[in-house]
Amino acid sequence: MNNRDFWAQKLRSAVTAADSGPSENDLAEAPMLTYWRPHVSRHGAPILWGIASGHPRLKGGWITTSQLVAIDVEQGWARTASRWYALGRPFADYERTIAKGLGMEEAPPGFVQMDVPGYRPLDDLSLLDELLAAWRKRMVFNDKGEG
């Protein structure tokens, strides 16, 4: 199996897991991602960026995840190609905290800019949902050997 096939299988497995949703145990063992923000590559691949704690392979601190396949902000979880994440506070909360510290009533969108090389922030979660839905359709199309 080549690397591309391996990665495609990993993504399919992650989608299947996301469709079922995380178990209580999945979330209990998942790393926590705080001050998370979605980003997208120029090819349309979404990831999350934020402060991780409890990650099995990475030290705590700012990270980028593997490709995002599903997110449920209301339930507080995200599924990437590699693992489940429990979602803490979003990056917008961090922006509001900084704005208040500067005496501002509100933080305008994009108030705090942090560069993630090769990616741009995607703060509109409805656009993120559309992007994930389109990506899933593309993946299914490619699985049928038609793409």
Image (spheres, grey):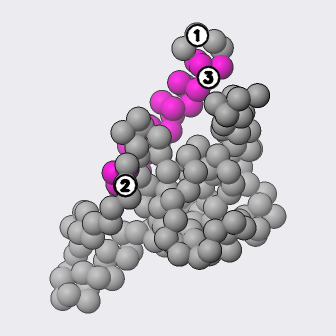
Three-letter amino acid code of the residue under disc 3? Val
For mark 1, does the 10 Å Cα neighbourhood hold few (<14), some (14 to 19), or many (20 or more) residues?
few
CB under 8 Å between discs 2 and 1: no
Q: Residue at x 76, y 68 (%)?
A: 29
Disc 3 versus disc 1: distance between alpha carbons? 9 Å
Residue 72 or residue 31, whichever sits in front: 31
Location of residue 102 in the rendering, given as x and y in whole percent from the top left corner: 20, 87
Front residue of 118/9: it is 118
**Amino acid under label 1?**
Glu
Please name which of the two marks, 2 or 3, marks the residue nearer to the observer.
Answer: 2
The reply to whether callout 3 and callout 1 are in contact (CB within 8 Å) is: no
- Left or right relative to 51: residue 107: left
- What is the x, y in percent for residue 79? 63, 51
Discs 2, 3 touching: Cβ within 8 Å = no
Q: Position of residue 66 (x, y in %)?
A: 58, 51
Residue that mark 1 sits on:
146
Q: Residue at x 22, y 75 (%)?
A: 106
Q: Amino acid at mark 2?
A: Pro
- Residue 137, by quadrant, is top right
Q: Quadrant of residue 5?
A: top right
| Secondary structure of the residue carrying numbered label 3 | helix
Given residues 84 and 107, the one toward you in this image is 84
Which span is picked out in magenta? 119-143
The N terminus: image quadrant: top right
How far apart are the two marked residues, 2 and 3, measured between alpha carbons? 29 Å
User: Which element carries disc 2, helix, strand or loop?
Assistant: loop
Indicate left or right for 39 with 75 as reference. Answer: left
**Residue drawn at 51 percent across, 32 percent down:** 135
**Mark sitting earlier along the chain (2/3):** 2
Does residue 70 show up? Answer: no
Please name the residue that numbered disc 3 is placed on. Answer: 140
